[in-house]
């Protein structure tokens, strides 16, 4: 209370001497600068949220292509088994469709990973495994009608089963890695957005305080001049 009592006369004395009246315009200018800074930070916050949304969209595209490769490989395997059991050439046509779309999905996946050299290498390794598996299916279908025993032997062969397992593990590894990256990016984006929002709010509040002080200084100065 004593400090406040001593401060008020000091401020009044400064007003009387005309010192604080001269601060009206600079204070209002500072308020404008603070307000513009706060608006700029809010704009940066919106930009960061847009970037986060773009990362989510990209991750969704990656996950979609991984699922597409997995689905088409299963589809090819089913058509091989269907042809072995029925000798219906319709399964061969379906097999070509599934095989072509599996490779298209691999191409799209590689394009999405183009800016990540290390992950692109992993996609290239996966492509080799996928191509090897598709070549096996094509060779089994090329055995012609009545090749059910040959297909059964290939399905139960330990080495060939390990090859298929390697493909699935590779796809799962890419999927898990993408989900981890997406989670990390979203958390970082949320932290930055929260920090920027708090800073922008502080600037806006200070801008209003400075504008109020500037108006007080200006109005008091005009009153004293009159």
Image (cartoon, helix red, strand yellow):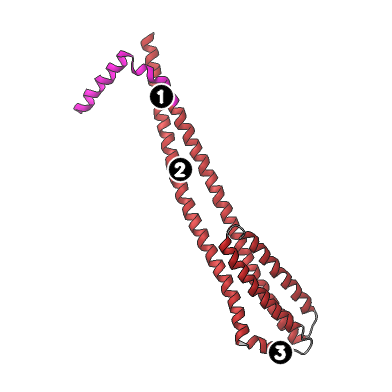
Q: Which corner quadrant of the image does residue 21 belong to?
A: top left
Of the two numbered discs 3 and 1 on the same chain, state the one appearing first in sequence.
Answer: 1
Q: Residue 78, can we see it? A: no
Give coordinates of residue 148: x percent, y percent. Answer: 72, 89
Contact between marks 1 and 2 (CB within 8 A): the answer is no
Which of the pair 118/60 is nearer the observer?
Answer: 118
Image position of 123 with respect to 189: above or below:
below
Please, what secondary structure does the residue beneath circle 3 have?
A: helix
- Tell me where residue 193 appears, x and y as whole percent: 47, 47
Q: What residue would you read off at disc 1?
A: 27
Residue 106: x %, y % from top left: 66, 67
Give me the C-alpha separation between circle 3 and circle 1.
Answer: 88 Å
> Where is 106 relative to 83, above or below?
above
x 50%, y 40%: residue: 42
Q: Position of residue 187 (x, y in %)?
A: 47, 55
* Disc sitting over residue 150 in the figure: 3
In magenta, the rendered stretch is 1-29
Q: Secondary structure at mark 1?
A: helix
Q: Which mark is residue 197?
A: 2
Mark 2 crowd level (few <14, some 14–19, many ≥20, 10 Å Cα):
some
Tag nearer the camera, 1 or 2: 1
Q: Tell me the chief SS of the magenta region.
A: helix
Q: Residues within 10 Å of mark 3 (few under 14, many from 20)?
A: few
Q: What is the C-alpha distance between the residues marked 3 and 2?
A: 65 Å
């Amino acid at each position: 209370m004593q400090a406040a009592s001593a401060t008020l006369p000091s401020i009044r004395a400064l007003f009387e001497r005309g010192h604080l009246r001269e601060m009206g315009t600079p204070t209002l200018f500072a308020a404008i600068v603070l307000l513009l800074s706060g608006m700029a930070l809010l704009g940066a916050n919106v930009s960061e949220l847009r970037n986060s949304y773009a990362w989510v969209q990209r991750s969704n595209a990656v996950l979609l292509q991984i699922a597409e490769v997995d689905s088409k490989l299963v589809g090819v395997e089913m058509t091989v088994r269907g042809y072995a059991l029925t000798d219906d050439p319709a399964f061969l046509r379906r097999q070509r469709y599934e095989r072509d779309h599996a490779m298209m999905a691999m191409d799209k996946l590689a394009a999405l990973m183009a800016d990540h050299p290390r992950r692109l290498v992993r996609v290239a390794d996966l492509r080799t495994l996928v191509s090897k598996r598709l070549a096996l299916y094509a060779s089994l279908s090329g055995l012609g009608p009545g090749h059910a025993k040959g297909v059964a032997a290939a399905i139960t062969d330990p080495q060939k089963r390990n090859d298929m397992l390697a493909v699935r593990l590779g796809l799962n590894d890419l999927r898990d890695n993408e989900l981890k990256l997406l989670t990390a990016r979203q958390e970082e984006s949320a932290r930055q957005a929260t920090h920027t929002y708090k800073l922008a709010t502080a600037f806006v509040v200070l801008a209003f305080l400075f504008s109020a002080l500037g108006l007080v200084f200006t109005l008091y100065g005009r009153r004293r001049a009159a």
